[in-house]
Image (tube, rainbow, N blue to C red):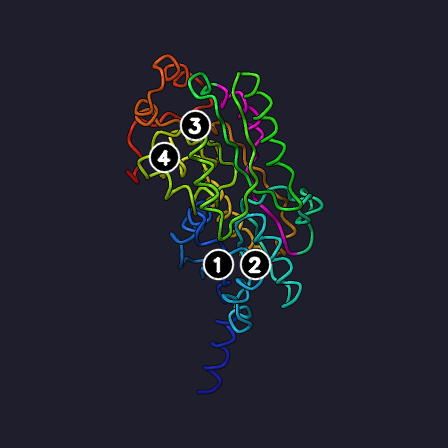
Amino acid sequence: MEARVFPLRRQRDKKKIPMVGVVFHERDTAHRVIAHGFNRETMNGFCQFRFFPVGERSMAALQGVLSPAVFKEIDCIVVVGTTLTVLIKKFCKKYGPRDILSLGAGWLKEAGILDNLDLPGGHLSAICMDLEAINTLPKYVSLFVKRRKKVLVVHSTPKYLGWFSEKAAAVKGIVEQAGAQVHIEVLAPGLRTESRLRKLCQAYDIIVLFEGCILNMYVRALIHESWCREKLFIGGQGMISIDQGAPVAFGPEFLDLSEVGMTRLREWAANKRPMGAYPAVMLPSKRVFYVNIPMLRHLGNEEELIEELKKRDDVVVIKHWPRSF
């Protein structure tokens, strides 16, 4: 009897399905959208998934959801976003190496995530969005300043990133040439952020939001208040921003990250090579601007401008009211 049991047990161990932990910020809609892409295949033939939403981007938050006992069961970590990827690298350095697949992180070299995108090496690789198309954002914003002359640009800049500040400065330069007044505000999520943002929104006509988490945590509430519905919000999370009530938005489609990430995990599970053996992938983003035509009409925008936006190749036209309204 024993001769039959133990060989079967060893055979099951050899065919163990890898456990993949998905780490994301629970209050960031883009993070939830990407994580949901994996939730559709929680159990399948090549791996299992466990989800670890964190309430804030901090080492303490990670330690709260990834206890040593849980961490031992994880073979690979899928992590969403730049800051959480940096933290997961530190976490694995402290508690033990794991294969890591980073999704949607930016500035891989500047943030110290990867030195070589073609041959990452080690246990980490990444799948990101190419946001070069957003370089045309300043001219895009300038289309809306004919009737609105006070523009607020909001972003938060971690110490290792200069992208937000560079793009905000570019918006300021071109939009001011179009005759508008522009103010740039750097905000980090905190106890006084909502009150500060509320005060700023009251003073400006157009609000451009680069940082997604600020839109999700604060503006989603503001945008539904009666006084705020007359403001032109330009959100930084593409279709997610449109669904939350922003009439105009820019940003990639995040579900592509989940689909390509799933393909990468299948390769990883089948070949049993370290994640760092796979090159980082940069997904193209061609149409990165979104406009909600009913919302623009509600705000009193000229039909001439609306028709011009409809004709642009880089614009996704939405013809229905936001889901949140």
The quarter of the displayed image where residue 77 is located = bottom right
Decide which of tag 1 and tag 3 comes sooner along the chain: 1
Question: What is the span of residues highlighted in magenta in the rendered image?
Answer: 123-142
Element on which disc 1 rests: strand
Q: Classify 10 Å Cα crowding around label 2: few (below 14), some (14-19), many (20 and above).
A: some
Looking at the rendered structure, the kind of residue marked 2 is Ser
- Viewer-nearest residue: 276 or 140: 140
**Mark 3, residue position:** 205
Q: CB under 8 Å between callouts 1 and 3?
A: no
Decide which of tag 4 and tag 2 comes sooner along the chain: 2
Looking at the rendered structure, the kind of residue marked 3 is Asp
**Mark 4, residue position:** 228
Q: Distance between the residues labelled 1 and 2?
A: 9 Å
**Mark 2, residue position:** 58
Q: Where is residue 284 in the image (x, y as percent from the top left)?
A: 54, 32
Element on which disc 4 rests: helix
Q: How far apart are marks 3 and 2 (CA)?
A: 34 Å
